[in-house]
Image (spheres, rainbow, N blue to C red):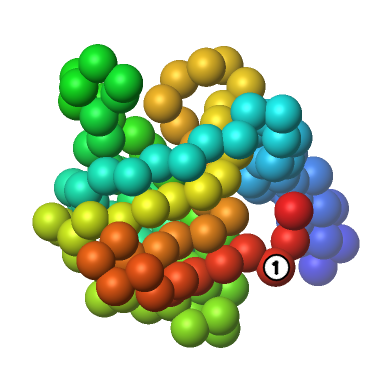
Amino acid sequence: MRNFILCFSVLTSLLWPVAALSHHSFSLEFDVSRPVELRGTVQNIEWTNPHAWVFLETEDEQGNVQGWAVEFLGVLSLLRSGMGPDTVGPGDLILITGFGSRDGTNTANASSLTKVDTGEVLWESRGR
């Protein structure tokens, strides 16, 4: 029994850092001084943990199509706030506000989601 406890303790201490790295700090990846407003068409949605993702295509000022990956809250938090996996789908025209990535890629963290054709705010972050 003593060996089991020792082995369990060692294994737990070795795996804890892996679990800690699976989640990240907002300020580590995203920049509050880089607000973004993305109007585009939903291409795909990943309703997965630890965060849901919406992938959309937008157009820049010159009319070039750009793909964006937008991170949302965790699935349980989204469900509690009223957003579900069927809230938006591929082909929907949406407006997302949020903050861009620190590394300048087309990645963002969402703070609101609005359906363009109705103007209905489908989700809004209560944080940041």
Using residue 41 as the reference point, say whether residue 26 is left or right of it. right
Rendering quarter of residue 38: top left
Q: Which residue is drawn at 24% across and 66% down?
A: 117
Using residue 86 as the reference point, say whether residue 30 is left or right of it. right
Q: Which residue is drawn at 44% across and 61% down?
A: 113
**What residue is disc 1 on?**
126
Does residue 7 show up?
no
Front residue (pair 19, 39): 39
Q: x and y percent of residue 52 in the render?
A: 43, 57
Front residue (pair 28, 105): 105
Rendered view: 46 above or below 75: above
Q: x and y percent of residue 80 in the render?
A: 56, 83
Task: Classify 10 Å Cα crowding around label 1: few (below 14), some (14-19), many (20 and above).
Answer: few
Q: x and y percent of residue 101 in the render?
A: 57, 27
Q: Residue at x 56, y 31 (%)?
A: 100
Does residue 52 show up?
yes
Rendering quarter of residue 28: top right
Q: Residue lying farthest left?
A: 91
Front residue (pair 103, 115): 115
Rendered view: 61 above or below 10: above
* Number of disc labels: 1
Q: Residue at x 23, y 56 (%)?
A: 93
Q: x and y percent of residue 103 in the render?
A: 57, 16
